[in-house]
Amino acid sequence: MTDPTSDGVTGWKRRSSVPSMSDVHRSVAVKGMSSSWRRAAAFIGPGYLVAVGYMDPGNWATSIAGGSRFGYTLLVVALISNIMAIILQSLCARLAIASGRDLAQACKDAYPKAVSRTLWALAEVAIIATDIAEVIGTAIGLNLLFGIPLEIGVVITALDVFLILYLQRLGFRWVEALVIVMLAVIAVCFVLQIALADPNWGDVIRGFAPTTEIVTNPEMLYLALGILGATVMPHNLYLHSGIVQTRNYGDSLPEKREALKFATIDSTVALMFALCVNASILILAAATFNTTGRTEIAELGEAHSLLAPMLGAAIAPTLFGIALLCCGINSTVTATLAGQIVMEGFLDIKLPPWLRRLITRAIAIIPAAAITIWYGESGTAQLLILTQVILSLQLSFAVFPLVMFTADRRKMGDLVAPRALVAFAFFIAFVIAALNIKLLFDFLAAAA
């Protein structure tokens, strides 16, 4: 049975029975505001929750390793990844606003049960990999600032689910406010650290120019894919398509068009902010470690301990630790929300909100905590980079369905993506897939 609407959307098999994130669905007022500026301001928030995933602790590991090993060369990868992210996240908002579905719900509707369950399993693997990075980052931040052992820090990170439950009782805007405040703290910390590092800005600008060495050098490609996986993250595609529906923007076509415009502006501005933070991490590593010959730095703890003697300022490692802790807390909050959207959308589980969050959080954090404790402090860098490569390998399984849905007029109606945007999005999807195939080929060749 199709789901016809006033916008001519007839390509879905069934009506969406439960809205995405039903406990906060359409809870933020937009419709009825007389001023377009106020309506635009009401959309500020979801983009910054999405941006958190683009600067999580996994990003720190790949950016520090890339900056210390190859200097400013991989800055272009961060830039290209961010452009990809802006395009893909705009498609997420388009899917949600046009169809009233998040990406998980759309996959469940469009594909046979075996395929949708496989996509669900792959999405859970991506969220577990994300959680590993966030658990490690938060635990290391607690250890660096307060001396809390890694194992105890891992347990503390699991408590974020109660923080989310409390804030959402106050309103979803409180969750967004927490995230935005912490992002501001991170930005201040990096502005101060970059000022202390005093990089060569000519080399920084040249680092944004592309080079074929990134593809031909297997070690550089591995880190480049790690940066790609840490930037364009699969769970963010599910997250954005769910949280944008917290806005009560109305159901008419003009209202949806305006909502799409404001949501796209919100995510684009937020992702440009994320690019600045990601570039700052890589620049800091290049200016502090690569220029002094310390090309092997990859551990977050080691980077923290070396900042003071190399920058000549006692406050530098403290700023690093504060920013890392804020990144970790922010990332666990958004990963928990993404886990809820993925499980509810694919499995259509109907449980009380608090129980749903506990279950979705447990699925991700239990294996993440176990792996983190098993590896211990000595292996955190390799584990962080590996999780980002895993995310990159999972990415195609979320990107291709997203692009195909938003290119289908039967599913999107009048808000179907323009042909030029679809062509660019498919190009991005195939580039990601091709890079992943090359990574696997290089890995198998090295193993042989």
Image (cartoon, grey):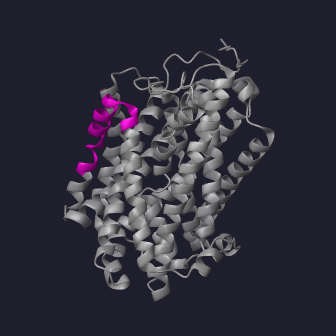
Return the residue nearer the eye: 157 or 120: 157
Q: In this picture, is 50 found above or below 4?
A: below
Q: In this picture, is 295 found above or below 192?
A: below
Q: Is residue 118 visible?
A: no
What's the magenta region?
155-174
Quadrant holding the C terminus: bottom right
Q: Position of residue 329 (x, y in %)?
A: 34, 50
Q: Is residue 40 visible?
A: yes
Q: Residue furthest front?
A: 35
Return the residue nearer the eye: 253 or 77: 253
Q: Position of residue 184 (x, y in %)?
A: 41, 55
Characterize the magenta stretch by its predominant secondary structure.
helix
Q: Position of residue 354 (x, y in %)?
A: 30, 28
Identify the residue shown where x is 60% and y is 36%: 93
Return the residue nearer the eye: 141 or 153: 141
Q: In this picture, is 202 found above or below 23?
A: below
Identify the residue shown where x is 37% and y is 71%: 299
Q: Quadrant of residue 361?
A: top left
Residue 5 among those drawn in magenta: no
Residue 156 among those drawn in magenta: yes
Q: In this picture, is 74 found above or below 294?
A: above
Identify the residue shown where x is 46% and y is 74%: 284
Return the residue nearer the eye: 156 or 273: 273
Q: Residue furthest bottom?
A: 292
Identify the residue shown where x is 55% and y is 41%: 237
Q: Position of residue 205 (x, y in %)?
A: 63, 74
Q: Residue furthest right?
A: 419
Describe residue 268's horizontal placement relative to residue 135 as left or right: right
Quadrant holding the N terminus: top right
Describe residue 170's horizontal placement relative to residue 400 as left or right: left
